Image: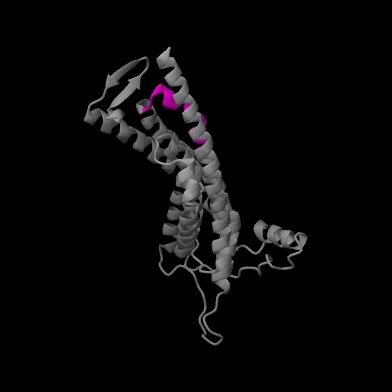
Amino acid sequence: MALFNRNRGSEQSEMTFIDHLEELRMHIIRSVLAILIMAAVIFIYRNWVFDYIIRGPINPDFISYKLLCQFSHWAHMGDALCMPPVKVTLITNTFGGQFLGAISMALVGGVVAAFPYIFWEFWRFVKPALKQKELKNTRFVIFWVSFFFFCGAAFGYFLLGPFTFNFLAGFQLGTQSGITTLPTFADYVDNLTNIIVGCGLAFELPVLAHVLTRIGLVTPSFLRNTRKYAIVVILIVAAFITPSPDWMSQMIVFTPLFLLYELSIIVSSRVYKKMEKEDAEERVDEWE
């Protein structure tokens, strides 16, 4: 297997299965330490993080509410994107609810903040198994993977989150149901985590298209021919990412994911053309 033949400097040595597991263990340990360090920092400043970051999407003064309303007026859409302030009181029904919630908040934040380093450790583990030719096409891979992940996370936090929580907080079952929505802190953090991490991973679509094209699993023509099926899949993914069932929130997720799919076709096309060029050059060299 390729992963067992890993380069060390200028020489290539064959690793045993135990050596392979030992190296993987060290990468995992360093990744976990990075998460714990970031989580510890977040826990120390938990009050500031909660007031100004975690509560952002349900804060009536959140910047997204103001900008969306201004954009709605600028685009002559009236108050279509102007959402009423969210009035939510988070509760906890256990003595240790706030403490455990703070730990959960810190750990999730640690994973998100340490994502570039986690992927860097993963890349260090995989990189020695790649050939020199394959490595030429992986420059800036850590930057692009991190870039798309944080773009997705920002999209979920600043755009999808406010729409989702605004809809769920204002939804009423019947006109005289007498039901009051009192979400727990844990429930809110879980929903916010699903939105941010889900969008972050979903935005990795162009990177995934690049990798799959490189290893020969997909082609640009395949992506074009399966566009109609991809639309259905993206709609399903949008439904999973958005906790709220309203069509507007799902369309907010669907639109960028569909655009990312189109971008993936462009990326795949460029990679495929480059591979064809490289194969042609190799054939010329063989004839010479």
Magenta run includes residue 133 = yes
Q: Residue at x 44, y 58 (%)?
A: 101
Instruction: Find the residue positioned furthest to the top.
Output: 288
Q: Residue at x 42, y 20 (%)?
A: 283
Q: Is residue 38 visible?
A: no
Colour approach in the figure: one colour
219 in magenta: no
Image position, residue 19 (x, y; %): 25, 28
The image position of residue 31, as x and y in percent, is: 40, 38
Q: Quadrant of the C terminus?
A: top left
* Quarter of the rendering occupied by the N terminus: top left
- Vertical placement of residue 223 versus 158, above or below: above
Q: Residue 208, percent across and down? A: 45, 42
Residue 53 location, quadrant: bottom right
Q: What is the span of residues highlighted in magenta in the rendered image?
A: 130-144
Picture coordinates of residue 116, whole percent (x, y): 48, 38
259 and 40: which is toward the camera:
259
- In the picture as drawn, the residue positioned furthest to the front comes out as 287
In the image, taking residue 188 as reference, residue 6 lies left or right, namely left
Q: Is residue 221 above or below residue 83?
A: above
Query: Chief secondary structure of the magenta span?
Result: helix
Residue 220 shows in the view: yes
Q: Nearer the viewer, residue 186 or 148?
A: 148
Question: How many numbered marks are there?
Answer: 0
Q: Is residue 205 above or below residue 244?
A: above
Q: Is residue 108 left or right of residue 256?
A: left
Depth order, front residue of 149/239: 239
Residue name at image x 52 percent, y 78 percent: 180
